[in-house]
Image (tube, rainbow, N blue to C red):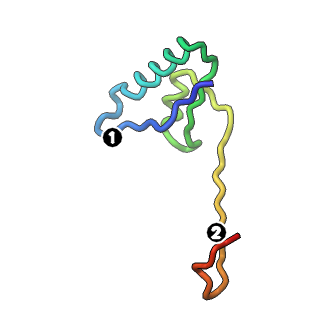
Amino acid sequence: MGLVKDRFTVHTYRVRGIASAIIAHCISHARALGIDDILIGSYARDTPKYLYQKLGFVPVCLTRHFVKTIEHPVGREDSPIY
């Protein structure tokens, strides 16, 4: 499986086909290497998902991020947590 990560187009260069061209190149390169599937990430509410769908990508999963706020005992804010 191929993975396309960390892509971003500077605002002043958007809507010029740059991202589409780069991703198309990645697809061609993956095909030449015999890779069958390519994973590209996008947040559910983020606009790049429309570009990825236009390029033939389909949603397969939803990623969730979890965070835990650790409460420290009063007066022990700098104590290590084990």
Name the amino acid, label 1.
His
Residue under the point 58% across and 25% down: 2
Observer-side mark, 2 or 1, equals 2
Residue 54 higher or lower than 78, as above or below: above
Q: Toward the viewer: 29 or 61?
A: 29
Quadrant housing the N terminus? top right
Within 10 angstroms of label 2, few (less than 14), some, or many (20 or more) residues? few
Q: Based on the displayed image, in which of its 4 quarters is residue 12 positioned? A: top left
Residue 13 picture location, percent across and down = 30, 34
The disc, 2 or 1, on the residue closer to the chain's N-terminal end is: 1
Residue under the point 36% across and 27% down: 18
Residue 40 picture location, percent across and down = 56, 32
Determine whether, in the image, residue 53 is placed left or right of residue 61.
Answer: left
Which mark is drawn over residue 48? none
Within 10 angstroms of label 1, few (less than 14), some, or many (20 or more) residues? few
SS assignment at label 1: helix
Quadrant housing the C terminus? bottom right
SS assignment at label 2: loop
Pointer 1 residue: 11
Residue 49 higher or lower than 65, as above or below: above
Pointer 2 residue: 69
Residue under the point 68% across and 37% down: 61
Q: Are marks 2 and 1 in contact (CB under 8 Å)?
A: no
Name the amino acid, label 2.
Thr
